[in-house]
Image: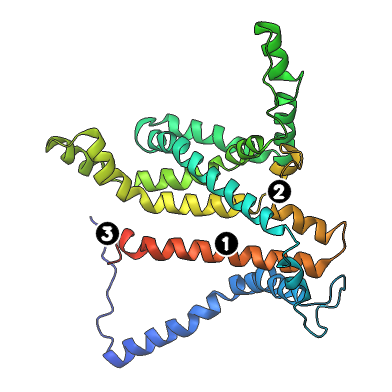
Amino acid sequence: MGEAALPRDDSATPPQAAARRRLGLRAGPLYSLPMLTLLAVGFLAPLIAVIGFSFSEPRSFDWLAEPTLENYRTIFDPSNTVYLSFLWSLWFAFLSVLILAVICYPVAYGLAKVFGRWSMVITLLLVFPLFISENVRLYGWVLFFIKAGVLDGTLRALFDAGIGDFLFTPEAIVFGLVYVYVPFMLFPMTLGLSMVPNEVVEAAGDLGASRLQVFREIELPLAIPGIIIGSLLTFVLAVGAIAESKVLGGQSVIVITHDIEIAFTYSQNWPLGAALAVLLMLVIGVLVMTVLRYLDLDRILGRR
């Protein structure tokens, strides 16, 4: 005996249906109240405080005093080289995204299409380092790359030649960014590739399309949403990174987040640090919105 079908309420008149829709619209904000409260307390309130501090008198702690543009004048002073920190941070983030896109695509394709039941094991291996502090992992790489360390000592013992001066260079910073942010590029990219129907790829092959044509005309366009999400997430995180430049770079290159940290800690100039943070948020926001504007996500996601 089959299950009884659930009764459908076909007796509701149009006014009753409209009343129910209005009730649902009124209940929606109520259901979202906990999340809105969390966002207001954890995100909006600190953001307002930072913006308020950016207009305070230099080296003061009164963000409700009469506003001033002195901190922004200091930043844009021609004798100030803070713009170099911005450029270094943006360059490192852009380079990291490019390298990660090339490295992660084959792995993401394997996780989505090839590895099968081994995908879960490989995913766990990639996630496991996230359970260890980022600083601990970076100091581990310092011991690995430092002169007379693990790699240098092994090469000298086997081939009587070391690795040279790799540690405390811009290249070491990029290596650290790539290493730390692999999961943030890989998993969105894997999700995007898993959305590519196998039937479409097989049909293209049956119609005579080469592997390159399948990649260019089918897999890449359909996987673009995941690639975009991974790239934006990696870029934003890499711009705001600081541990890589301090630990692996040895402060050989000063990034913008290091200037912000110095302003808030050693200099005790919170208004200047807040102004730098506001400018960093504006630069990242403008770049991200520009990318999203030209990529037309509505068309990519199939909304129209």
Q: Residue at x 70, y 18 (%)?
A: 152
Badge 1, how many Cα within 10 Å: few under 14, some, many 20+?
some
Give the residue type at disc 3: Glu
Q: Residues within 10 Å of mark 2 (few under 14, many from 20)?
A: many
- For numbered disc 2, what is the local secondary structure? loop
Give the residue pinned by disc 3: 3
| The image quarter in which residue 76 lies | bottom right
Residue under numbered circle 1: 284
Which one is closest to the eye, mark 3 or mark 2?
A: 2
Q: On the rendered structure, is 123 left or right of 201?
A: right
Q: Residue at x 48, y 50 (%)?
A: 231
Q: Position of residue 157 (x, y in %)?
A: 71, 7
Displayed quadrant of residue 138: top right
**Pick the front one: 177 or 203:** 177
Task: Identify the image quadrant of the C terminus.
Answer: bottom left
* Mark 1 secondary-structure assignment: helix
Could you tell me how far apart the alpha carbons at marks 1 and 3 are, in whole angstroms? 55 Å
Tag 2 residue: 242
Please tell me whether mark 3 sits on a helix, a strand or a loop.
Answer: loop
User: Is there a contact, CB below 8 Å, between mark 1 and mark 3?
Assistant: no
In the image, what residue type sits under mark 2? Ile
Q: Nearer the viewer, residue 167 or 218?
A: 167
- Circles 1 and 2 in contact, beta carbons < 8 Å: no
Q: Amino acid at mark 1?
A: Ile
Residue lying at the far front in this picture: please name it: 78
Rate crowding at label 3 as few (under 14), some (14 to 19) or many (20 or more) other CA atoms within 10 Å: few
Residue 166: % across, % down: 68, 28
Alpha carbon distance from label 3 to label 2: 60 Å
